[in-house]
Image (cartoon, grey):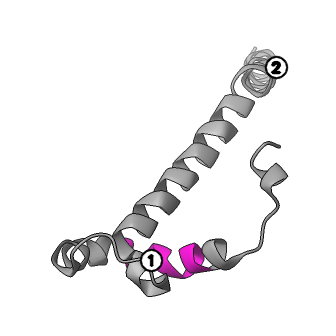
Amino acid sequence: MSNWRDKLQAVRKMLAEVLYGMALHEIERSHRRMRGSLEHVFILITFGDMVGLPILPPYYCMRLLPFVVPEINGWRRRLMRERDYLDAIF
């Protein structure tokens, strides 16, 4: 009886993963992409003086610095990477 129940549970889990992939995977990817672009803009506004674009006074930037330190290297690479305008569309 336990073997039959395990097989039914495995089929149920497989169907749940397939339905998730069909319905929600693309939405989740677009939300992650949007979050990344918003984080990119946030870091650009607060720490733009690293690349020559001072917007906010340094006091507020220094208050936010401990939260942003892990993201700075990746942000600088993304900012300096050359992109095509059609990349944002696709």
Marker disc for residue 70: 1
Callout 1, which amino acid?
Answer: Pro
Marker disc for residue 6: none
Query: Magenta segment: does it hold 73?
Result: yes
Judge from the rendering whether residue 43 lies leftward or rightward of residue 24; answer left or right.
left
Dot 2 surroundings within 10 Å: few (below 14), some, or many (20 or more)? few
Name the spot of residue 73 as percent of width and height, x first. Answer: 54, 82
Callout 2, which amino acid?
Answer: Val
Work out whether 24 lies above or below 86. Answer: above
Which of the image's four quarters has the N terminus?
A: top right
Question: Which residue occupies 72% across, 75% down?
Answer: 81
Query: Magenta segment: does it hold 79?
Result: no
**Considering depth in this image, is 40 or 28 the residue closer to the camera?**
40
- Disc on the earlier residue, 2 or 1: 2
Would you name the residue on which mark 2 appears? 11
Q: Are marks 2 and 1 in contact (CB under 8 Å)?
A: no
Query: Picture quarter containing residue 70?
Result: bottom left
Work out whether 60 lies above or below 24. Answer: below
Question: Which residue occupies 38% across, 76% down?
Answer: 47
Name the spot of residue 57 as percent of width and height, x first. Answer: 21, 75
Question: Which residue occupies 66% across, 38% down?
Answer: 30
Q: Which residues are magenta?
A: 68-76
Name the spot of residue 32 as percent of width and height, x first. Answer: 60, 45
Disc 1, SS = helix
Disc 2, SS = helix
**Considering depth in this image, is 20 or 26 the residue closer to the camera?**
26
